[in-house]
Image (tube, rainbow, N blue to C red):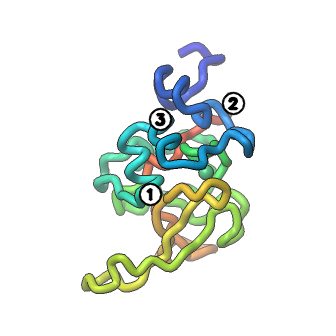
Amino acid sequence: MNAAEPTGEPAPDAVKNPAVQGRIPDDQIPQTEAEWKKRLTPEQYEITRKKGTERAFTGKYTDTKTPGTYRCICCGEPLFTSGEKFHSGCGWPSFSAPIDKTRNKTVAEHADDSLAGVPGFGVRTEVTCRRCGAHLGHVFDDGPPPTGLRYCINSASIILDEAKK
Ligand SMILES: [Zn+2]
C-alpha cells in the first residue's frame, strides 16, 4: 500500500464520510438522522445512531494489534489508542482506558437499563462519543490493572489511524 493513502475504509466510504479522513469541524457534524444516514454505512448507522451491537467476533478491530489511534467513525474525534487495547476474549475491541485516561470525559458514560431484566446483565454503563453522541459500546469493571476497566467497543463505531512508521 502507498504510505500516503489513508488507512481504514475503502475510498467510496471515505468520500461519503469525511470523518474517515480525520476530525471534522464542529459545523460539519450532522444534526439530523437523515444526514447521518447519508454518511454512514447501514451497519455504522445502526450501531452508532441506534445503539446497535455488532455480533461478537465479527468486527474488523476485535483482534487488531496495529499501533495507532482509534477515532469516532461519526465525527473523527480521537477516542482510544492501541496502547490501552488488550485481548479480552469477549469478541469486541477492548480498551482499559479512553485516550485522555479520564472517565466520562471524551468518552461519555450513561446508565443503560435496556437489559436490566435479563439475568446476568443488570444496569450497564453505555459509552458514547461526547462530541457527537455516537454509541460506542459499554464499559465494565472487569478489565486489567491499573484501571480495572474494560471499554467494550463496536468496531463499526471507530476507525484506526495507523501510527506513522
Ligand atoms: Zn463522535
Q: Given contact means CB atoms under 8 Å apart, are the residues at marks 3 and 1 in contact?
A: no
**Residue carrying label 3:** 38
Residue 148 x, y percent position in the rendering:
56, 76
Q: Is residue 101 above or below residue 140?
A: above
Look at the image and tell me whether residue 2 can be seen. yes
Where 81 falls versus 125 (above or below)? above
Q: Residues within 10 Å of mark 1 (few under 14, many from 20)?
A: some
Horizontal side of 126 relative to 100 (left or right) equals: left
Residue at the (51%, 31%) spot, across then down: 8
Separation (CA) of disc 3 from disc 1: 33 Å
Counting from the top left corner in percent of width and height, residue 164 is at 69, 30
Q: Residues within 10 Å of mark 2 (few under 14, many from 20)?
A: few
Residue type pointed to by label 1:
His
Please name the residue that numbered disc 1 is placed on: 87
Q: Secondary structure at mark 1?
A: loop
* Marks 2/3: CA–CA distance: 30 Å
Q: What residue is shown with label 2?
A: 164
- Which one is in front, 6 or 114? 114
- Amino acid of disc 2: Lys
- On the rendered structure, is 84 left or right of 89? right
Q: Is residue 147 left or right of residue 138?
A: right
